[in-house]
Amino acid sequence: MLFSFRKRVVMVSTGICLLAGLTGCTPQATRNHPDPLETWRARVADSRGFSPPVQHRIIDMPEKQTTGLGHETVDRYPDRPLPEKPITLKIHQGELPVLLRALARSVGISIIINETVKGTTSVNVVKIPWGQVFEGILKTHGLSYAWEGELLRIVTLADKTDMVKQLEADRKLLSARRQMALAEPLVTKIVHVDYADAGNLKNNLKHFLSPGDDGKTRGSVLVDDHNNALIIQATRSDLERILALITELDQPTAQVLIEAHIIETTRQTARELGVQWGGAYRWHRKSDNYWITPNAGNAIGVGSSTDNLNPTTGWAGSFPADLTSATVAGSGLSLGMIAETSNAILSAQLTALEEENKLNILSKPSITTLDNQAAIIESGNDIPFQTVNDNKVQVEYKKAVLRLEVTPHVIEGDTLRLDIVTNKDEPDFSRTVNGNPTVITKYAKTNVVVFDGQTTVIGGLNKQTGQNLDYGTPWLRNVPGLGYLFKGSSKGQQMQELLIFITPHILKSRLPDSGTAGGTTGSTPAQQD
């Protein structure tokens, strides 16, 4: 009985194992679960915005009107130089037509001689250019020549006179045809402008209208501000040229997102941050040092890795504190030109220093602008001051603001040139004139070349502040007469430094099909006006 029970248990266990083995060998359909972070990545990309894609427009011409006018050349018989091959010739009383044909045959020229050309001539020349000999023989006999294509025609003076008359008649006919062409009715076309400035486009296109005989332009280019369109009236040839220019000029430009951190801190904290003004920054992937100088004269300088760089003018950003930790290893940049992957490190470090009361983040503005268009950020107050004019007191206002102006220029790919102008005006109430505070102005201008997502910094906008500190033993320092024994005071000065970190981002164009960001090569289907 026990043996039978054990046998059943073994059989059941074997069946279960066999079933489990078969089940394990059966392939199971795998499910592709969507990445939950993909949606948030798309939202982050959308939050920055996109640049409009390049469009390929097709602008139709108005229907062509048949005018029956053709084009002719002004000069029917253009001159050609005669051969300069030196020849030696000696002949006595030779027939003139025979001599001319022999000369033409010697240089491979096809010649036509009028039957009225007759006479004899004698020639004795040694190594004289062919053209001089030929023209000398013709002038001796009162003859001339004219090119008609590849043919050289020998004519008499009477024939030459007739040819001049014929040429003058041809020119008059051509002038009449041109007058008829100028009388051709003008055609009108309305073109809607999508991206370019219609006013600037009009000023450029009006120079492509042809002038008439009186020197005045035939046709016009007008701007319709309500529809942002151009009203073009011109001849067909001018209109074709103008429409081709509009197709090329009315294209979207890239957009650039400008992010800035404007902070105020002490010079000691700036040094702790790794900032040292007046030096250079290093690019680890190359053996060159770079420095930035202002005022657009020398945007960027390059020196060898062992040079001692000493820029002589302006404020320059130098960041000797390398970011070589494991979190940013391989970025190959110092703090002065921070890669996009390290931008968060800068923001986190500034926030941490602010929490420790070592610096004050005045503003973190963000603004988007078009390529080659200035982005202006301004923050401050209007300071009132009094003026006296004709014994009347008037109150006027002067701006005391922090102003940052950045004009980006996308060079190609992921490189930008930034034209940066910044000024900081602040009132100084310690120095007044008639009760009005003076305004301290600090100004900086520079041009730099950076990559997409890199950070450049402007410094040197300093001010010196004084500190008065009172200290002492609580309660006892307030005792009359004896309190001075238990208290004291100290005075000190501290240098405040204003730092402006600027990070540009090139906004990629949105791909029309996928709805995601892509390169600038995306295009939309052709539009037709």
Image (cartoon, rainbow, N blue to C red):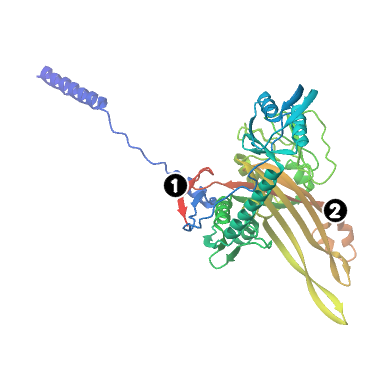
Pointer 1: what residue?
39
Helix, strand or loop at mark 2:
strand
Q: Quadrant of residue 95?
A: top right
Viewer-closest of 221 and 181:
181
Local packing at callout 1 (Cα closer than 10 Å; few below 14, some 14-19, many 20+) is few
Viewer-closest of 312 and 211:
211
Q: Is residue 372 left or right of residue 392?
A: left
Residue at 84 percent of width and 44 percent of height: 313
Residue at 52 percent of width and 61 percent of height: 189
Residue type (three-letter) at the residue carrying disc 1: Thr
Asked if 33 appears above or below 217 in the picture, the reply is above
Residue type (three-letter) at the residue carrying disc 2: Gln
Residue 98's tag is none
State how far apart marks 2 and 1 are (Cα). Answer: 53 Å
> Farthest bottom residue?
391
> Farthest left residue?
1
Q: Is residue 425 at least partly visible in the picture? A: yes
Pointer 2: what residue?
493
> Mark 1 or mark 2, which is nearer the start of the sequence?
1
Local packing at callout 2 (Cα closer than 10 Å; few below 14, some 14-19, many 20+) is few
Q: How many numbered discs, if any?
A: 2
Viewer-closest of 255 and 211:
211
Q: Quadrant of residue 157?
A: top right
Quadrant containing the N terminus in the rendered view: top left
- Where does the image place residue 267, in percent across and percent down from the top left? 79, 47
* Front label number (2 vs 1): 1
Residue at 54 percent of width and 44 percent of height: 520
Asked if 493 appears above or below 36 in the picture, the reply is below
- Where does the image place residue 461, in percent across and percent down from the top left? 79, 52
- Where does the image place residue 325, in percent across and percent down from the top left? 64, 33
- Where does the image place residue 476, in percent across and percent down from the top left? 83, 61
